[in-house]
Image (cartoon, grey):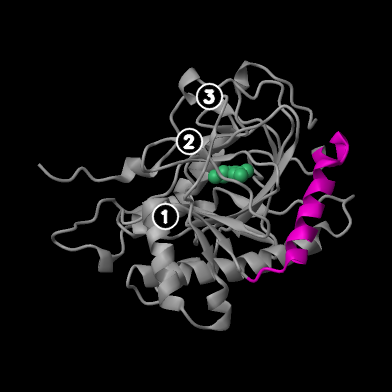
Amino acid sequence: MGGLSMNEAFVQAPEHRPKPTVVEASGIPVIDLSPLLAGDGVDALAAEVGAASRDWGFFVVVGHGVPAETVARAAEAQRAFFALPAEGKEAVRRSEAEPLGYYASEHTKNVRDWKEVFDLVPRKTHVALADGQLVFDNKWPQDVPGFRESLEEYDAAMEDLAFKLLELIARSLNLRPDRLHGFFKDQTTFIRLNHYPPCPSPDLALGVGRHKDAGALTILYQDDTGGLDVRRRSDGEWVRVKPVPNSFIINVGDLIQVWSNDRYESAEHRVSVNSAKERFSMPYFFNPASYTMVEPLEELVSEENPARYDAYNWGEFFSTRKNSNFKKLDVENVQIAHFRKSLGA
Ligand SMILES: O=C(O)CCC(=O)C(=O)O
Ligand SMILES: [Fe+2]
């Protein structure tokens, strides 16, 4: 059960509770990346990625070249970790000062999520954020054989895919293919293992409350349970993202929204839970160096289309958000809307 028990901290405000029936999404773009592996059709693919990023901020990729065994091994390590007895998870618990590892008390917009998570930065010893406010040091569970190796392998495959997607996005904006690569020299990328235990009150709680991903891109693996909902831009309706075997879901994050000066928009999403079946998902959050000053790219601003955001420091934004997700605060957590310029008039 993951040790969660229902109480008022999990209860969403009535307007944010899931409806008893959620529409199964139709129309979410499914993009086959296999032409990329064959080395042709790049322009057509970039156009598809551009349209999906503009219209949905969200798409599914197949033909991505990540071996099924790599995904299966990582997913197996994830299941084995969450199946550990409480002491095994406690041994790698995160704290405010050490933000990687296990915890079951994340809040999204100050409401507690019905989930337990494990955060890690594989293939790195640590990641330091701006001003030394946060240092990410991995905590490795002792009793899960092959845990570290399988996640390192998964991480390498995700990084390859992330750079391919970044290139497609740059091309789709008529930028040099490697225009965005430089931001990712000293990444603050991390992987999160999510476990959503069955919930006795799926009508009141959410696995993850509504939010947009703050980084550049998210590559999400989900198991076959279902529960991820995305807010459809055309009508504002929450729709369920049907699990597609051997696929990943790609979220355009807030950074791409800002870099593209609102040509692309990050999509709001959330996770519904159910009373019968646990669910696992594994997002790879592709994030730039902490010292990155985020602002609309100069190629995409002009006199007619001025910058819509003030520059902000990624490391500061990220550590503020991480801290405010760790415990319930009385203040609204930081959003890119806070950096939006008031234009016009
Ligand atoms: O579990 C999922 O499908 C999505 C999780 C998510 O949105 C997140 O961790 O940011
Ligand atoms: Fe998310």
Expressed as whole percent of the image width and height from the top left, the position of residue 99 reads 64, 45
User: 10 Å neighbourhood of mark 1: few (<14), some, or many (≥20)?
Assistant: many
C-alpha distance separating marks 2 and 1: 23 Å
The residue at the far top in this view is 8
Residue 105, image x, y percentages: 66, 31
Q: Which numbered disc flags the more N-terminal residue, 1 or 3? A: 3
Q: Earlier in the sequence, mark 2 or mark 1?
A: 2
Asked if the residue at tag 2 contacts the one at tag 3, i.e. Cβ–Cβ closer than 8 Å, the answer is: no
Is residue 100 or residue 79 the one in the foreground? 79
Quarter holding the C terminus? top left
Mark 3, secondary structure of its residue:
loop
Local secondary structure at mark 2: strand
Dividing the image into four quarters, tell me where ligand 1 lies.
top right
The residue that mark 1 highlights is 255
Does the magenta-highlighted stretch encompass residue 74?
A: yes
**Snapshot quadrant of residue 188:** bottom right
In-image side of 75 versus 135 (left or right): right
Magenta part of the chain? 65-89
Q: Are marks 2 and 1 in contact (CB under 8 Å)?
A: no
Q: Which quadrant holds residue 168?
A: bottom left
| Residue type of the residue flagged with mark 1 | Leu
The residue indicated by pointer 3 is 17
**Residue at numbered disc 2:** 238
Q: Is residue 186 left or right of residue 175?
A: right
